[in-house]
Amino acid sequence: MNILVTGGAGFIGSHTLIELYKAGHTALVVDNLYNSKEEALTRVAGILDIDHIPFVKADIRDREALEKVFSTNTFDACIHFAGLKAVGESVAKPLEYYENNMNGTFVLLDVMRRHNCKNIIFSSSATVYGDPAIIPITEDCPKGQCTNPYGQTKSMLEQVMIDLQKADTEWNVVLLRYFNPIGAHPSGRIGENPNGIPNNLMPYITQVAVGKRESLGVFGNDYPTHDGTGVRDYIHVVDLATAHVAALQAIERKQGLAVYNIGTGHGYSVLDVVNTFMKVNNLTIPYQIKPRRAGDIATCYCNPAKAEKELGWKAQYGLEEMCRDSWNWQRNNPNGY
Ligand code: NAD
Ligand code: WQD
């Protein structure tokens, strides 16, 4: 299939491109490079040993630019990664987040249907469950109260696409709720490249390891978990990437609407991650216990059985590989791209 990949220069998009091409698909990326570098696409092409990844630098809110992309290409499906994703920033800049994520998706969906491309895989998030009512989380767990505008955009956009598919059943909509993606391509040539101080745990750890930050703050050790620190379902980004390939197969089978949790089903605490990172990479990560971070929950991990049953997809990598590959990327690219 030929796939439009919005936000394809980003962390998850760049890894997904590799798995798409390996599975025999082709892609064109539309990205405004707000949170990414074109160099990522050059490296993806290098890993795949191809000349280049077709790329249009454009904002998906730019209808004219998108119309042009659709008039000059034929797409079988779109994988829609483009969006702003920093939770804290979304609290400070709600209008910018609602405007970018909602409007960008509205324009994209409208241009897609005008060009009769009615297959979409959407990057949703475990954040839609809020403080989950059931652990491990299954897809029928009720959506919860999101504590930030970023999460609200994911929850609302899911609903927009559910309603769209209900109104026009020619659409195939696959909502993938990612848990906590970390790791990097085993080549160490592409990986996560956050701007400024990382908000997320793994990039913070790797920046401490590479000497850019002094010590990790562990946000709270009084949660009701096995060691008091927050528990999450970390998933290797390469596993996340292959989930998109599996979702495309579901689209080929005309799945209609489908929702999947994309995680490993294992919950690891902050200290589990820190200790595994130190052991696997033979490094010391200094850390200090800090107060809880506002909006955090104690425990979040999924039951990924539905994705295995219906998509034939299952995560292959464990926490050790995630820690090894995150460090391999950071060590080889101390300043990112
Ligand atoms: P990322 O920031 O690395 O990638 C997103 C890409 O979208 C960037 O390259 C950015 O430049 C681009 N973009 C943003 N707004 C755009 C616009 N209006 N027009 C064109 N391009 C635009 O993020 P990521 O970690 O690769 O995440 C990809 C998707 O997955 C996002 O939608 C994110 O919300 C979602 N997600 C991420 C995580 C995570 O922890 N990384 C978890 C759950 C869901
Ligand atoms: C993981 C654990 C922290 C940093 C976020 C979004 C979610 C999704 C994935 C997009 C928590 C602790 C963290 C640090 C720490 N993204 N921590 N010190 O919060 O589970 O999820 O990213 O959809 O929507 O909310 O991920 O990596 O920020 O935190 O102790 O410096 O690590 O408290 O327990 P989170 P995270």
Image: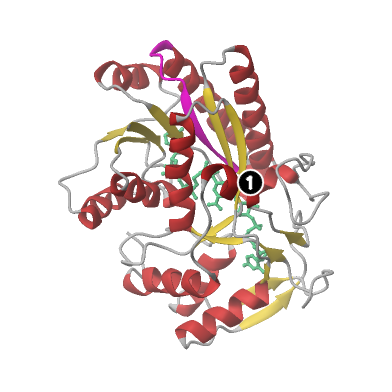
Quick check: 261 left or right of 327?
right
The residue stretch that appears in magenta: 114-124
Location of the C terminus (image quadrant): bottom left
Colouring scheme, one of rainbow, by chain, secondary structure, one colour: secondary structure
Return the x and y of residue 302 as percentages of the image width and height. 68, 55
Task: Give the amino acid at mark 1.
Answer: Lys
Q: Secondary structure at mark 1?
A: helix
Give the x, y percent position of residue 187. 31, 66
In the figure, 161 relative to 186: above or below? above
Examine the rendered structure and indicate whether residue 66 appears above or below residue 10: above
**Placement of the N terminus among the 4 image quadrants:** top left
From the image, tell me which residue sits under label 1.
306
Residue 144 visible? The answer is: yes
In the image, 53 versus 88, the foreground residue is 53
Residue at 48% of width from left, 39% of height from top? 247
Please tell me in which quadrant of the rendered image residue 78 appears: top left
Query: Relative to 81, does residue 112 appear above or below in the rendering?
Result: above
Residue projecting furthest to the left: 51
Determine whether, in the image, residue 315 is placed left or right of residue 24. Answer: right
Residue 276 x, y percent position in the rendering: 57, 80
How many neighbours does mark 1 have within 10 angstroms: few (below 14), some (14-19), or many (20 or more)? some
121 part of magenta stretch: yes
Q: Who is closer to the viewer here, 248 or 334?
A: 248
Residue drawn at (54%, 28%) of the image: 255
